[in-house]
Amino acid sequence: MAPALSRNRVEHARVLVVGDAMLDRYWFGAVERISPEAPVPVVRITREEERLGGAANVAFNVKTLGAQATLLTVVGDDEPARKLRQLLEQQGVSALLGSDPQLYTIVKLRVIGRSQQLLRVDFENQPDHEILAALLGDYERVLPGHDAVLFSDYGKGGLTHIPRMIELAHAAGKPVLIDPKGSDYSRYAGATVITPNRAELAQVIGAWSSEAQLHERAQALRRTHRIDALVLTRSEDGMSLFDDAGHVQVPAQAREVFDVTGAGDTVIATLAAMLGAGLTLREAMPIANRAGGIVVGKFGTASVGFEELFA
């Protein structure tokens, strides 16, 4: 386990989260029959719930741990955007939300019946123009007041300016953490740490046939793009860290997996809060691994509190 960490140190850590925010909607209902119109269940909705999703969920996870979070993102000028603002305010997450009337705020609607997800409906549009350019000024302005910068990339077009933002964070001496998307990791050049899962990493380095091959390719990828460290999240196999000193692996925390939604958000949010509190990446990783292990035992996009994490 990492060195003893006072709550005070975590409370003073300030994390700037930049990326694609979304609203997670859940419709819960009873499934009692099959539709006469098509071979599908009929769900009679009895309850609705709304939660922060995407980069907003990452910022919420930072806040739940006890650290301070600021979210920088662009949303549409619509009802889901208003709901997002309201939820962020309720959760005490500072937000710099740019508004773009041509953008649909991303909504992921999940229909739940008999305690399982029956259907997910996504509402979004790909921007046909640069949506984050207007926020570069805000980013530069608030950057000095934070201890770590976390980019939550969902491949929705909100992080076109990421190379410039990494450069600015670097110049300000801030660690940069990235939850990556897609196969072009050159845009993440110079980052402190990237946290792909197995499928995401395989998309970039190809499927590996042995641990030795994984190690070799992960280290080569890191060196090519001047990334200090790569943390691979491996579900039931825990987490692996690749850095200049070599490789470290932490086993998964054995517990019942209920829902993996948002577990990656919790892991990177915990890493950012711990680095912001002054821990090294090697000290922070077992803590983040533990947080991920706790959150998969909860339903939907969930989070972990300081007490729960260090109990």
Image (tube, rainbow, N blue to C red):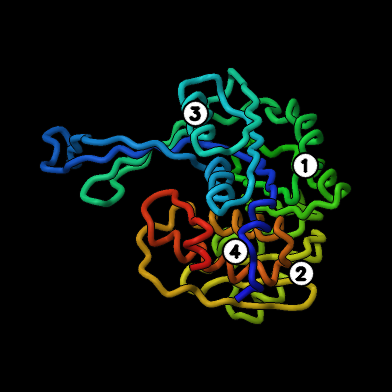
Q: Distance between the residues labelled 4 and 1?
A: 36 Å
> Horizontal and vertical percent for residue 123?
45, 31
The amino acid type, in three-letter code, at marker 2 is Ala
Q: Which of marks 4 and 3 is in front?
A: 3
The amino acid type, in three-letter code, at marker 1 is Gly
For marks 4 and 1, the one nearer the N-term is: 1
Relative to 100, does residue 114 appear above or below in the rendering? below
> Horizontal and vertical percent for residue 305?
50, 56
For marks 4 and 2, the one nearer the N-term is: 4
**Could you say whether the residue bearing mark 3 is in a helix, strand or loop?**
helix
Q: Distance between the residues labelled 1 and 2?
A: 34 Å
**Could you say whether the residue bearing mark 4 is in a helix, strand or loop?**
helix
**Could you say whether the residue bearing mark 2 is in a helix, strand or loop?**
helix
The amino acid type, in three-letter code, at marker 3 is Gln
**Picture disc at residue 86:** 3
Q: Nearer the viewer, mark 4 or mark 1?
A: 1
Q: Distance between the residues labelled 4 and 3?
A: 38 Å
Residue at the disc numbered 4: 202
Q: Nearer the viewer, mark 1 or mark 2?
A: 1
For marks 3 and 1, the one nearer the N-term is: 3
Q: How far apart are marks 2 and 3 (CA)?
A: 44 Å
Q: Distance between the residues labelled 3 and 1?
A: 24 Å
**Picture disc at residue 145:** 1
Q: Distance between the residues labelled 4 and 2?
A: 14 Å
